[in-house]
């Protein structure tokens, strides 16, 4: 949950496609979402990669701004920022903060959201800079995971056991923490991996998405990886069937990894 103003909300994370589909095709998607996840109880969450993609829908900026003005919403931190937040909460034992910023902060006379301010934000240079940053983060993680592929073959039957997959995730988390926080790792080499849930989930998500598949990564794959990092810290997710299928595999791998309600785009249409 998250506190916005004086009220606490559950967090509903939205895939890029569900917003762009609603804007482009004028389907009653948003009404259906609100009926399922009332904004009296839920705030909507977007990842930075989703914000970047939506900024490309130039003909829908005004409509998108008016939509965001209707309900409480947040933009989550990116993969790197989530990892840093996990590290700092581990070291300082403080509450986790998933929020990068909120469009509700773009106020008009300090009272209400200004749709024009949101529209201008989507056209700003800050969006481009954000895009370059997050694409680099996602590409780096994907390249790192795939680089270990040759040295981590499946079992003799050509498949990976749950144990092998869990070991792979733990191995990559340790190597990333060792590389990014060498002093910490030198003193806490037996740290609790489960605390770095965003990092672990994004690694395991990428494993399931690419290890059985020899194809090259697409831009949409990078966006999915970015979204996966936020999953441990939200209460609900609406997305494509493939992502939900992988989430179900993660739950089957370890029921303690995620506690999240999932709804496919097909269901909400």
Image (tube, rainbow, N blue to C red):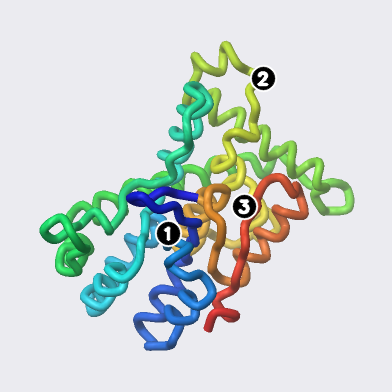
| Mark with earlier residue (3, 2) | 2
Task: Report the Cα–Cα distance between label 2 and label 1.
Answer: 33 Å
Q: Which of 48 and 39 is in front in this view?
A: 39
Locate residue 72, reporting x and y percent: 36, 61
**Mark 3 or 2: the one toward you:** 2
| Mark with earlier residue (1, 3) | 1
Q: Name the residue under label 3.
A: 205
**Mark 1 or 3: the one toward you:** 1
Q: Mark 1 points at which residue?
A: 45
In the displayed orientation, state which residue is furthest to the right. Answer: 157
Does residue 266 lie above or below 130 as drawn?
below
Q: Residue at x 59, y 28 (%)?
A: 175
| Mark with earlier residue (2, 1) | 1
Residue 190, which numbered label?
2
Locate residue 37, reporting x and y percent: 51, 70
Q: Is residue 62 left or right of residue 90?
A: left
């Amino acid at each position: 949950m998250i506190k916005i103003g004086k009220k606490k909300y559950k967090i509903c994370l939205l895939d890029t496609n569900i917003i762009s589909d609603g804007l482009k095709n004028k389907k009653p998607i948003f009404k259906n979402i609100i009926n399922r996840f009332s904004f009296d109880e839920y705030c909507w969450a977007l990842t930075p990669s989703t914000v970047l993609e939506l900024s490309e829908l130039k003909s829908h900026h005004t409509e998108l701004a008016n939509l965001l003005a209707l309900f409480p919403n947040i933009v989550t931190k990116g993969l790197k920022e989530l990892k840093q937040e996990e590290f700092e909460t581990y070291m300082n034992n403080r509450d986790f903060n998933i929020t990068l910023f909120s469009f509700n902060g773009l106020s008009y006379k300090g009272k209400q959201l200004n749709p024009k301010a949101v529209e201008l934000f989507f056209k700003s240079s800050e969006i481009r800079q954000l895009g370059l940053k997050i694409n680099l983060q996602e590409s780096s993680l994907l390249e790192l995971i795939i680089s270990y592929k040759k040295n981590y073959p499946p079992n003799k039957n050509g498949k990976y056991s749950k144990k092998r997959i869990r070991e792979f995730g733990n191995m990559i988390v340790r190597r990333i923490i060792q590389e990014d926080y060498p002093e910490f790792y030198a003193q806490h080499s037996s740290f609790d991996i489960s605390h770095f849930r965003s990092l672990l989930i994004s690694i395991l998500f990428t494993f399931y998405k690419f290890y059985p598949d020899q194809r090259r990564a697409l831009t949409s794959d990078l966006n999915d990886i970015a979204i996966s990092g936020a999953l441990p810290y939200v209460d609900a997710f609406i997305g494509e069937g493939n992502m939900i299928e992988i989430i179900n595999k993660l739950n089957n791998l370890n029921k303690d990894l995620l506690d999240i309600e999932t709804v496919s785009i097909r269901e909400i249409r």
